[in-house]
Amino acid sequence: MNQTPIMSTTTSGLLSGKVAFITGAGRGIGAAAARLFAREGARVLLTARTESQLKAVTEEIRAAGGTADYVVCDLTDPAGVRAAVNRSVELYGRLDVAFNNGATGQPPGPMDELSEADFDRVCAVNLKGPWLAMTAEIAAIRATAGRGALVNTSSVGSLMANPALPAYGAAKGAINSLTASAAATYGPEGIRVNAIAPGTTLTEMLYDWDAESPGTIEQLNARTPLGRAADPDEIAQAAAWLLSDRSSYVTGTVLRVDGGMRA
């Protein structure tokens, strides 16, 4: 997997002057987004559950000349989520944009074979977690920047039948609905809310799925017109655009970044 090199921030960056809050930033799409947002001029606050991963990405961004810090946060902890969002304001004085990317997977298989505990965990992390984060982020934007943008990570698997990952797909489908509702609610205040729906992306979650069900990546690529999986940076690029002022008239949308899988 090729990783786009980090370059020093510039004043002409896509997110220049903005403060960005990112969940699930220790690895995969979230880590790629943290690197990219910093390259594009944002001051970033990274959150995830694993401190060693957060520290490594933060130090990498700083070494490249970017501004970054991190806070350990579990998306199932309401007080912890609020404190993490508020930390961005404490550190940088404001909050402009947020990328709600943190998620958990599920054991692949038919719906009736999924345990209740796994179902509850997926819903707690992938649905309630982003709801908690969005609520705190909107409050922080209102109190500081006044206007801003949120992007939630959905999945192309929320847009069709998802027999291998039914709870994951259902939770992501609910995120699409929350995104639309938030866009309608907060648009009059100048707060835009969108989602991205990645297709097959080379993250640890995908590799874990492929390990449990060998051949998964190959099968998914065969269903993708571009014939390959995405690098996490390619997904992060879409989130960066949606958070930037260049998408100023875009809100309430679920942008497919799927190599044409749903074309």
Image (cartoon, helix red, strand yellow):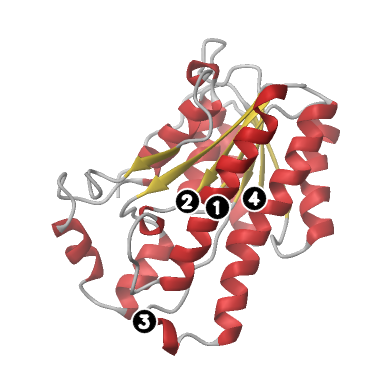
Residue depth check, mark 1 versus mark 2: number of the one nearer the observer: 1
Q: Which mark is residue 154?
A: 2
Give the Cα distance between marks 3 and 2.
Answer: 20 Å
Nearer to me, 249 or 17: 249
- The quarter holding residue 142 reads top right
Name the spot of residue 109 as percent of width and height, x first.
36, 81
Q: Which mark is residue 109?
A: 3
Q: Are marks 1 and 2 in contact (CB under 8 Å)?
A: yes
Numbered disc 3: secondary structure: loop
Give the Cα distance between marks 1 and 2.
Answer: 6 Å
Give the Cα distance between marks 4 and 3.
Answer: 34 Å
Instruction: Assess disc 3: are there few (<14), some (14-19) or many (≥20) residues with their C-alpha within 10 Å of its C-alpha.
Output: some
Name the spot of residue 151 as percent of width and height, x first.
56, 38
**Which residue carries the number 4 mark?**
55
Task: State the residue at coordinates (47%, 74%).
Answer: 106
Instruction: Assess disc 1: are there few (<14), some (14-19) or many (≥20) residues with their C-alpha within 10 Å of its C-alpha.
Output: many
- The quarter holding residue 122 reads bottom right
Numbered disc 2: secondary structure: loop
Tell me which numbered mark, 2 or 4, is placed earlier along the sequence: 4
Q: Are marks 3 and 2 in contact (CB under 8 Å)?
A: no
Tell me which numbered mark, 1 or 2, is placed earlier along the sequence: 2
Q: Which mark is residue 175?
A: 1
Residue depth check, mark 2 versus mark 4: number of the one nearer the observer: 2
Q: Are marks 3 and 1 in contact (CB under 8 Å)?
A: no
Tell me which numbered mark, 4 or 3, is placed earlier along the sequence: 4
Q: Are marks 1 and 4 in contact (CB under 8 Å)?
A: no
Give the Cα distance between marks 2 and 4.
Answer: 26 Å
Nearer to me, 173 or 139: 173
